[in-house]
Amino acid sequence: MDHNEISRDGQDKTKSSHHSPPPRAHSQLRTDTQEDGIVSHDRLFPVAAFSGTLIEYSLPEAMRITAELGFDGIEIACRSPHLPLDVPLQEVRKVRERAEELGLAIPALAGYVGYFSNLTEEECKSALEDVRQLIQIASVMGVPYVRVFPGAPNAFKAEEHHYEQAARYLRACVEEAAESGVQILIEIHNQTLIEDAVSAMKLQGLTGDDRLGFIHDAGNMYISDVDYGAESVQQLGASLCHVHVKDERRMAAAGEEGTFVNLTRHGNEAFMQCRLGEGEVDHAPLLGALHQSGYSGWITLECAAPYPAVERLAYDLKEIQRLMAEVKAQNQG
């Protein structure tokens, strides 16, 4: 997700400027990828766009753009103006129908719900109702995964009671989701309880339910300064259900457009959101590890670099296809 969306209300206070089914066929592939000798069948994994990267567009427009760029699917941001929790179910059905018309799969819904770890009991009950609404939307839409956040603080600051409270309510989320054929996923995210694979598996162990899955996000893990390569893939094992991709780089200070500040174990650090390959997150080892592990799920591109939204998505799709083609060639050599 965009680092400017981590807080419970979706506003960043530090801003300064089991796998899903294969994708349906899509006839509109980008011509520039064909000219470069890279076509969609070079993709090791189906690729979705995060609708949040197109938040200035309406959801129908974001879906149209995603299809025209040649993505296999779209991961929808479940917040206004795209898909708020109070959306009428008839509108949810229309979104599903429109996706089918465009040849787009919807591999996951990006929820902004949960945050159980440091809420009061009454707030947790209210948050659980929000999760139930998200599950219902996913069930009507036929989406297998929904994202739920465990809450703060950073893993390096968290105490046992934070994990225990989050686990207690996540256990309830997992059980209710399973009744609707939906799986709860936690995104490995800086400034939350789950900043690396170790803290992820710790939380799963406390829930006592291996149906709690995880979203691997190398960009977030780079910010937290933890391993995001082969070791993290091995540690997550079958609990790695979905993958987010974006690039970042450390900065001496924030202030430029596209920069933000996060608390890490090194203190308050500044970062720049980058297009794929222009930052410091090396995704090639991750893609190789995913391929070797037999991962068959999705990759969602989340670029929030300071470029026009359509331009940056097109750029990142071309770059991830290039990286996947290289990994594929190395494994065939």
Image (tube, grey):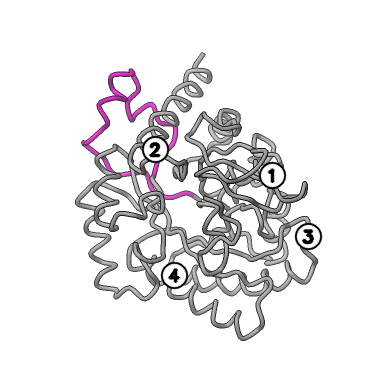
Q: Residue under circle 2?
A: 312
Density class for disc 1 (Cα within 10 Å; few <14, some 14-19, many ≥20) is some
> What residue is rendered at 67% in x and 38% in y?
252
Mark 1 vs 3, N-terminal side: 3
Amino acid under disc 2: Arg
Disc tally is: 4
Residue segment shown in magenta: 19-48
Q: Residue under circle 4?
A: 135
**CA distance separating discs 1 and 2:** 32 Å
Mark 4 vs 3, N-terminal side: 4
Density class for disc 2 (Cα within 10 Å; few <14, some 14-19, many ≥20) is many
Q: Secondary structure at mark 1?
A: helix
Amino acid under disc 4: Ile
Q: Secondary structure at mark 3?
A: loop
Note whether residue 298 is visible: no
Could you tell me residue 182's position as x and y percent? 45, 64
Eye-nearest disc, 2 or 4: 2
Eye-nearest disc, 1 or 3: 3
Question: Mark 1 touching mark 2, by CB under 8 A?
Answer: no
Q: Residue under circle 1?
A: 235
Density class for disc 3 (Cα within 10 Å; few <14, some 14-19, many ≥20) is few
> Which residue of the protein is positioned furthest toward the bottom in this rendering?
122
Density class for disc 4 (Cα within 10 Å; few <14, some 14-19, many ≥20) is many
